Amino acid sequence: MVKALGYSLLIWLWLIVPVFAGTITKIDVLKNTKAYIDVMIKGQYDSYQAVMSQSPFRFVIDLDNTSLSKGLPRTMRIKSPIVSRIESGTKDKGLRIVFYSARPDVAFHTNIQDKQGYLIVRCWKEAVSSTHIKTKRKNSNIKKLSHKQRVNYARILPKKRLEDIIGRVTANEVKDVKNSTDKISTYSNRKVSLDFYKTDLHNVFRVFSEVSGKNIIVDQDVQGKLTMALKDVPWDFAMELILDVEKLQKTERLNTIIISKRPEKKGEKGALLIRKVSNDVIQPAKRLKQREAQRQQAEKLILKASNLENRGNRQLALQAYEKAVWLWKDNIDLLKKVGYLHYVLGNFSKSYYFSKRALRLNTKDAEAAQYAALAAARMGKDAEADVLFKIAVQGEPKIPEAFYNYGLFLEKHKRYNKAITLYKKDEALFGPSLKLSLRIARLYEKMGNMNAACEEYRLIQVSGFDMDEPAMHRIKLKTHLLCE
């Protein structure tokens, strides 16, 4: 359902040609407290990228294809313990807005809410703790390092765990995912597939003793043979069916089930059996009916969204998909679709949010992890992106884009050896390509390993990759300059 991202998805948005020029009409502080500051950026723009930089610590937002309205100040000074000033300036064909930390050696946390027509940027700091004091000392030690050492130091990403990013997945959430059909009765999670053909009932219950781990005693008055086939059902549900069909009953004591004939009540033969339905059954049944109605409504919205997307109207399609996802909250494919579309439309914070929701449903889903990683990288959440890319390449299904995009991310942070390892895994799983071979050769060259670079360039020449004459000439020239 979710479209695969192309190899160049990580940089795709930078290649879009703007269709109109917007204007930022207002930059204003909405709320300024000791704990946090909220700033509104109002106006029109195509998309945005955001990153936290250091030396000094500052939060940089690049708005594409827009400019600052005449009359708005380029510098806004703020009396805040978090942000000292906000500066605006042109960047390529867009606008760069920079939030400077009140203390140049201390970072702050950020969050962006992307609403129609404006952004809300929240900046905050955690309460001072012993950890903060250690970090402060660590930052002061960085100043004593040389420029080259500081650059290398900045490349080391802080360690993060998946649960730090998506939150701890509770046992109840896991159970909800496994039982997404919303069963009314509560049966065991241990499912079985059973196939009986004219099997003696005593032997049937011996099977149940093995699958349940319980002691089962069958009364000698229980007689008969059973023919039944059940696929992937809870064992106690299967037993309940057999008891009903064979007019048997069970009593349970100390991990032991006793099976006996159900006594006939006076006047029971041929009479209708009426079982009282408790409120405990009625309420879940009502909820199930309501959820079924919501899912039917969601399916209609998904069909509408799919038609809009096929006609090229991604924005309206996304609106319909997003309405559907609130009706069908445990649909992981729908969550991934919404996360993907938000990404390609430049709504990185929303892409990050919906992709993480999908990841909570399945922490090993490679597609959900990749969309979350790409969005995190575009927002400058590099530590989170690193963790999520690892999940993307380790998870299922295996997708080539995850390996390639993680390689690009590692290159950006000058972790060349790891990037080469990722590209080679990509080749091993999905086959060699000119793009991968060139990246590996160029990385060897950057690392100063000319022997390995020469070998890669020579292999490219004899690989049979589809190349035009100018490309082949460039590679031959490169091989001549480096290797001869």
Image (spheres, grey):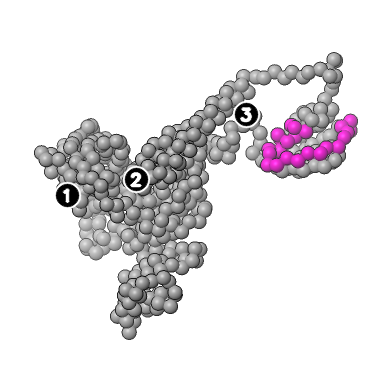
Residue on which disc 2 sits: 345
> Magenta region: which residues?
220-242
Sequence order check, earlier mark of 2 and 3:
3
Q: Secondary structure at mark 2?
A: loop
**Whether residue 89 is situated above or below residue 263 in the rendered picture:** below
Counting residues from the start of the chain, the first of labels 2 and 1 encountered is 1
Q: What is the x, y in percent for residue 344? A: 36, 48
Q: What residue do we see at 24% from left, 52% from top?
A: 54
Q: Residues within 10 Å of mark 3 (few under 14, many from 20)?
A: some
The image quadrant of residue 448 is: bottom left
Q: Nearer the viewer, mark 2 or mark 1?
A: 2
- Residue 388 is at least partly visible in this image: no
* Disc 1 element: strand
Q: Is residue 406 above or below residue 198?
A: below
- Nearest the viewer among 317 and 333 is 317
Q: Report the residue at 34% width, 70% height from top.
A: 442
- Residue 184 - label: 3
Please state the horizontal and vertical placement of residue 151, each as a whole percent of the image: 26, 60
Which residue is painted at 21% across and 57% down in the image? Answer: 143
For the residues labelled 3 and 1, the Cα–Cα distance comes to 60 Å
Q: Is residue 38 visible?
A: yes
| Residue designated by label 1 | 90
